[in-house]
């Protein structure tokens, strides 16, 4: 059922649930359920299932990799570092150890532990000097340090080793991110495009390519690209939010609203939901000119968004502005009003 595609994920999860009711200790079913939830971008559900699998069989490398990915998707970088480091320390010579080290370094980079990430990757490169994944990850560590030229150099070294496989798509995507940081939009677009050609399933590259279109104000092409992403990944919250921006840029306000609502439905409790609620509020306030609906969405946003959410300050300012515009409540006769 999983192999039949996203339309069958629910049915696959139902069968796995049936299996776990028979045998709650079946780690394979917990892993499969977590993996499918991760594909659906349901990070909380994925983490819950994968933690069950990991608790039963902590030596299973794919479970560790998926759990680390889920933690990162949820912003739990410390937990990702912990679970990946635990695997490497307990099984330093496992055949999957170097792949786990590369993933660990990416988690350390996300946690801003750049020295630790560098050392982790150097350990991999001492064992495998021609490891393209390790070089690619090292390039992104340099990028995180602001060393764009060095990042570009190391990423091209990775391509010297492998420039044709699907694995090289990740390297091209990283090169595109470096080019964007250097304000070289044309190079970035070419890199993202090449990543998409090498691995059409790498939706992050297609989404990044769409972001270049958005930055250039080419909303029509951005929409076209993002529709392809959301068709392949119906629960890609970032893509739905970006599609809403692209549709709004073309004056298609109803289509933008539908896209934002898709983002909200795909991740009703996560960070993507907060972005969608803010975008809906802006759409109602600035474009559809419906202050009542804008206020309602802002109230939802302020309840759902984390205190450090990047849109919170703007949302609070908008809420104050709308409060000033709101008509005063009518007074009753008992309160001294006039008829």
Image (spheres, rainbow, N blue to C red):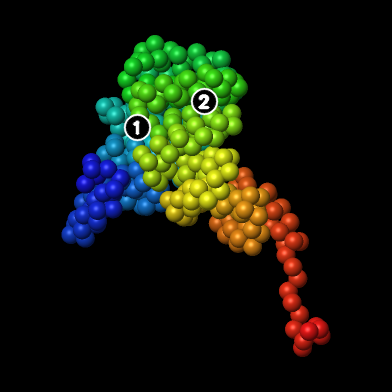
- Residue at the image point whose x is 24% and y is 56% from the top: 14
Discs 2/1, front: 1
Residue 72, how many percent across, how many down? 45, 40
Along the horizontal axis of the image, is 108 left or right of 185? Answer: left
**Dot 1: element:** loop
User: What residue did someone put label 2 on?
Assistant: 177
- Residue at the image point whose x is 59% and y is 58% from the top: 297
**Dot 2: element:** helix
Quadrant of the snapshot with the C terminus: bottom right
Residue 109, how many percent across, how many down? 50, 31
Name, please, the residue furthest toward the front: 251
Along the horizontal axis of the image, is 54 left or right of 68? Answer: left
Distance CA(mark 2)–CA(mark 1): 18 Å
Residue 93, how many percent across, how many down? 29, 27
Q: How many marks?
A: 2
Along the horizontal axis of the image, is 338 left or right of 48? Answer: right
- Residue at the image point whose x is 30% and y is 45% from the top: 6
For residue 201, the mark is 1
Q: Nearer the viewer, residue 270 or 66?
A: 270
Residue 165, how many percent across, how many down? 32, 20
Q: Nearer the viewer, residue 43 or 27?
A: 43
Name, please, the residue furthest toward the left: 22
Asked which quadrant contains residue 329, the reply is: bottom right
Along the horizontal axis of the image, is 282 left or right of 105? Answer: right
Name, please, the residue furthest toward the bottom: 334
43 versus 68 height, above or below: below
Asked which quadrant contains residue 284, the reply is: bottom right
271 versus 137 height, above or below: below
Can I make out residue 322 in this image?
A: yes
Sequence order check, earlier mark of 2 and 1: 2
């Amino acid at each position: 059922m999983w192999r039949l595609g996203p339309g069958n994920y629910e049915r696959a999860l139902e069968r796995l649930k049936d299996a776990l009711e028979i045998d709650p200790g079946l780690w394979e079913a917990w892993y499969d359920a977590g993996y499918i939830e991760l594909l659906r971008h349901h990070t909380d559900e994925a983490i819950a299932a994968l933690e069950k699998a990991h608790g039963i069989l902590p030596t299973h490398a794919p479970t560790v990799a998926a759990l680390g990915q889920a933690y990162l998707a949820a912003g739990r970088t410390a937990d990702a570092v912990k679970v990946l480091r635990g695997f490497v320390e307990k099984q330093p010579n496992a055949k999957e150890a170097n792949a786990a080290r590369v993933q660990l370094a990416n988690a350390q980079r996300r946690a801003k532990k750049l020295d630790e990430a560098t050392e982790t990757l150097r350990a991999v490169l001492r064992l495998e000097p021609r490891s393209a994944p390790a070089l690619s990850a090292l390039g992104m560590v340099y990028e995180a340090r602001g060393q764009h030229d060095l990042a570009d150099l190391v990423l091209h070294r990775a391509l010297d080793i492998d420039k044709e496989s699907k694995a090289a798509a990740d390297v091209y995507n990283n090169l595109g991110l470096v080019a964007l940081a250097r304000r070289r939009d044309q190079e970035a677009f070419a890199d993202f495009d090449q990543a998409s050609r090498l691995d059409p399933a790498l939706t992050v590259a297609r989404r990044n390519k769409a972001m270049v279109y958005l930055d250039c104000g080419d909303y029509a092409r951005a929409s076209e690209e993002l529709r392809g992403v959301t068709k392949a990944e119906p629960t890609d919250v970032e893509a739905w939010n970006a599609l809403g921006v692209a549709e709004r840029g073309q004056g298609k306000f109803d289509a933008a609203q539908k896209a934002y609502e898709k983002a909200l439905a795909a991740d009703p409790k996560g960070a993507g939901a907060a972005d969608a609620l803010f975008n809906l509020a802006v759409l109602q306030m600035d474009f559809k000119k419906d202050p009542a609906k804008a206020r309602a969405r802002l109230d939802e946003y302020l309840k759902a968004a984390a205190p450090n959410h990047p849109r919170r300050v703007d949302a609070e300012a908008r809420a104050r502005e709308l409060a000033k515009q709101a008509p005063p409540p009518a007074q009753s006769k008992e309160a001294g009003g006039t008829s």
